[in-house]
Image: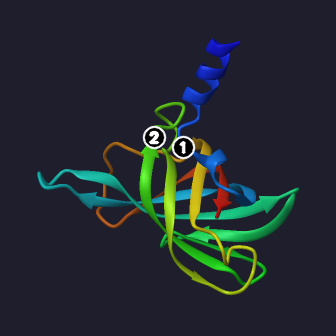
Amino acid sequence: MLPLLLSLLAAEPFDVAAHSAILSTHAEGAQLYECKAAADGALHWVFREPIATLIVDGRTVGRHYAGPKWALDDGSVVQGKMVGTTPGATAADIPELKLQVVDRHGDGRLKEAAFVYRLHTKGGVLDGTCAMAGALQSAPYSADYVFTK
């Protein structure tokens, strides 16, 4: 029993359970990349911004976008700053993140949020070379976002 419990705890990358959850959402969207020159002049895809729909029980409840920000249909908006990261399950999955809320607006469900966790990521990675500076390319992704106090 103890080895199983230890393996489950080791699998959880962040201390999500240590905080009171305010809201858990599923996100479907894309990570947007821009073709830019590296220091050596070679062109590579560089992350630009996310765009995703936040879903609860099959219903759209908000959006996730550059900032990074999360805006709910109830008028509440939070902006996060990354304070922790762990690799996705595969090389094709963007990292899981812990973000501290650094700004908030509105009196909706997110008004007391202190942290945002991006968990269970699937897809979203775009790497390698590209042909033209300034070109844009999106990579579909999904994740779960948990907002905590």
- For image coordinates 73% across by 71% down, the residue present is 62
The three-letter code of the residue at mark 2 reads: Thr
Q: Looking at the image, do the residues carrying marks 2 and 1 touch, with CB atoms under 8 Å apart?
A: yes
Q: Is residue 30 above or below residue 11?
A: below
> Which quarter of the picture shows residue 60?
bottom right
The three-letter code of the residue at mark 1 reads: Phe
Q: Is residue 147 above or below residue 11?
A: below
- For image coordinates 55% across by 27% down, the residue present is 10
Q: Nearer the viewer, residue 112 or 129?
A: 112
Q: Quadrant of the C terminus?
A: bottom right
Q: CA distance from mark 2 to mark 1?
A: 9 Å
Q: Nearer the viewer, residue 51 or 84?
A: 84
**Which badge, 2 or 1, is on the more N-terminal residue?**
1
In-image side of 28 versus 88 (left or right) = right
Numbered circle sitting on residue 133: none
Q: Disc 1 designates what residue?
A: 14
- For image coordinates 57% across by 81% down, the residue present is 104
Q: Quadrant of the N terminus?
A: top right
Numbered circle sitting on residue 86: 2
**Which of pointers 2 and 1 indicates the residue nearer the eye?**
1
Q: Nearer the viewer, residue 138 or 85?
A: 85
Residue 49 image position (x, y, % from top left) = 47, 65
- For image coordinates 38% across by 63% down, the residue present is 135
Residue 144 image position (x, y, % from top left) = 67, 50
Disc 1 on helix, strand or loop? Answer: loop
Total numbered labels: 2
Residue 74 image position (x, y, % from top left) = 78, 81
For disc 1, the neighbor class at 10 Å (few under 14, some 14 to 19, many from 20) is some
Disc 2 on helix, strand or loop? Answer: strand
